[in-house]
Every structure is written in structure tokens, then in C-alpha cells.
Image: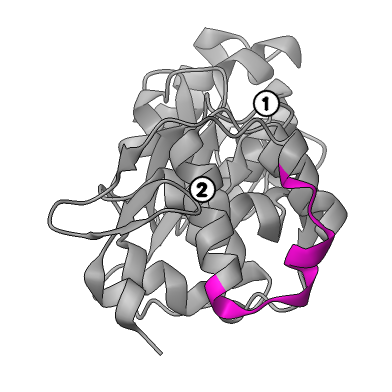
């Protein structure tokens, strides 16, 4: 198909991100009427993904481009999180089987229908992050996409938060062993702004077991630890210092 130079559809296709999405709310703000968008779909320029969400016909959808499109067009703050964020920083223990997963944090909103589409190159796995106040976010340029990504310190604690639904403690400890260069100031901040006792205590236990030097710079008296006992697993081993029951495999691991 040839596109008339200077036409609205030509401009739209030029502005759109390859592999990304077009949200009707944003398009209407740019004076693309519902009737005009229907004509584009009928003419084969655009294709609907879900209600109010379109993409360029025959485009191979990218999960990262979709997240970028959503954030930039609708002024949102979805972020790449948990093990997906750790992979961005070069920490990776998981070898994905089949289609890779992209963990995406939704702090203050319910995931929309488009998130669950199977047309992306990765399976987007949304999760809520209410236990983290003022999440520690960095912005990374990946293939000319500015992406919001959890800091390594926050990302690992997000993984702990998602046990056992998505991770297990033993696999996460293998990652903890790699985290030799975490910023103690950021660790302190994230621990302080985390409401989960389970996450706080398991993080400290793992960091101590791994022998990381930065743990000595953490003021544990100011992160809100309570005195209650927590049984994190059944048939585990009780760690009196942190008042948690951990997997025996993790306790015995050398």
C-alpha cells in the first residue's frame, strides 16, 4: 500500500514505536476520531489488540515496546521488575523454558486487558506492589526506548515478595550470591520503605549468609523489624536472629 505523503496515517505510522501499541485515548487527544481510526482498521493500516488498543498491521509486538507505549502515551509508570529487572543489570539465574516472561509492576492500578495478550514476544506477568512505598526506580535506554526499571535492590526484594507464586527461596539465594555490589544506601532505603516483615528478614538472612560487605553498613535498628516469629516454610529451620523459619536446604547450603 502506498501512503500519501503528509497524510495523518503516514504521520501516525512514523510516530508509532515499532512493535508498540497505540492507545485510543492518546489518539483522540491527537485529533484521530473514532471514525477515522475505524477507517484505518478497515483499510488494513491498523489492527485491534483489545478494546481501545491498536497496533500497526502485521507488526511483531514487543512487550518492552508495549510498556514504553503505555507509559509515554498515557503518562503511566509501569516498570520492569523482579527477575526481569535483575536480568537488565546482568544478574540471571533463571533459564526460561519456552516463551520468556516479563515481570511488570503495577503500583496503583489494575492491569488492563491488553497486558494479557499472547501476541507479544514475551509473556507479560503483572503484579501488584503495595508493600513498597516510594519504589526505587531507574530509567534505562534500551534500543531507544526509555524504560522504567526497578533498581537491583528493589528488584530482588520484589522477587522475595513473589515467593512462592513465581520463585523459590533457594533459586533466589543463588542470585543473592551475585549481588556483591549493591548500594548500601539504596538497600537501607528500600528496606525502610518495605512494609513486609517477610521480605525484610529473608533479605537480611540471605545477605548475611552470602557474606556481603555492604550488609555491615545497614542500620537494622531503623528499618522497622518487629519481634514476632514468622514461619516462611513448613518443616524448615528456625533462625533465631531473624525470627524466621527458612528451608533446610537453604540453611545447610554452603
Of helix, strand and loop, which one carries label 1?
Answer: loop
The residue shown at (42%, 25%) is 111
- The label on residue 133 is 1
At a point 41% along the width and 23% down the height, the residue shown is 112
* Visual colour scheme: one colour
Q: Distance between the residues labelled 2 and 1?
A: 17 Å
- In percent of width and height, residue 248 lies at 24, 70
Q: x, y percentage for residue 141? A: 80, 61
Question: What residue does disc 2 label?
Answer: 201
Taking depth in this image into account, of 109 and 199 the one nearest to the observer is 199
- Judge from the rendering whether residue 193 lies leftward or rightward of residue 66; answer left or right: right
In the shown orientation, is residue 244 left or right of residue 46?
Answer: left
Side of 217 where 54 appears, left or right: left
Mark linked to residue 7: none
Query: Judging from the image, what secondary structure is the residue with disc 2 in?
Result: helix
Q: Residue at x 65, y 19 (%)?
A: 27
Q: Which quadrant holds residue 214? A: bottom right
Instruction: Decide: is 133 above or below 62.
Output: above
- Magenta highlight range: 209-220
Q: Main secondary structure of the magenta part?
A: helix
Residue 147 drawn at (x, y percent): 72, 50
Furthest toward the left, the residue is: 235
Compared to 253, does 117 lie above or below?
above
- The answer to which of marks 2 and 1 sits earlier in the sequence is 1
Q: Residue, x 84% and y 60% (percent of image)?
A: 217
Please tell me how crowded label 2 is: few (under 14), some (14-19), or many (20+) other residues with Cα within 10 Å: many
Amino acid at each position: 500500500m502506498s501512503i500519501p505523503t503528509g497524510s495523518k496515517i503516514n504521520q501516525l505510522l512514523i510516530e508509532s514505536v515499532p512493535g508498540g501499541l497505540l492507545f485510543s485515548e492518546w489518539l483522540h487527544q491527537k485529533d484521530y476520531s473514532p471514525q477515522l481510526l475505524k477507517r484505518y482498521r478497515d483499510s488494513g493500516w491498523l489492527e485491534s489488540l483489545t478494546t481501545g488498543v491498536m497496533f500497526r498491521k502485521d507488526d511483531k509486538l514487543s512487550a518492552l515496546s508495549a510498556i514504553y507505549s503505555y507509559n509515554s502515551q498515557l503518562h503511566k509508570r509501569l516498570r520492569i521488575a523482579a527477575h526481569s529487572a535483575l536480568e537488565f543489570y546482568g544478574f540471571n539465574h533463571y533459564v526460561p523454558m519456552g516463551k520468556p516472561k516479563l515481570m511488570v509492576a503495577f503500583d496503583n492500578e489494575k492491569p488492563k486487558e491488553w497486558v494479557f495478550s499472547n501476541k507479544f514476544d514475551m509473556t507479560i506477568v503483572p503484579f501488584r506492589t503495595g508493600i513498597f512505598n516510594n519504589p526505587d526506580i531507574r530509567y534505562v535506554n534500551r534500543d531507544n526506548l526509555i524504560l522504567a526499571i526497578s533498581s537491583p535492590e528493589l528488584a530482588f526484594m520484589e522477587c522475595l515478595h513473589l515467593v512462592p507464586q513465581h520463585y523459590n527461596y533457594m533459586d533466589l539465594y543463588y542470585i543473592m550470591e551475585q549481588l556483591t555490589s549493591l548500594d548500601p544506601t539504596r538497600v537501607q532505603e528500600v528496606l525502610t520503605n518495605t512494609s513486609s516483615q517477610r521480605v525484610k528478614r529473608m533479605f537480611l538472612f540471605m545477605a548475611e549468609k552470602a557474606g556481603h560487605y555492604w550488609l555491615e553498613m545497614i542500620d537494622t535498628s531503623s528499618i522497622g523489624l518487629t519481634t514476632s516469629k514468622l514461619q516462611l516454610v513448613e518443616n524448615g529451620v528456625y533462625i533465631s536472629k531473624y525470627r524466621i523459619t527458612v528451608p533446610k536446604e537453604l540453611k545447610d547450603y554452603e
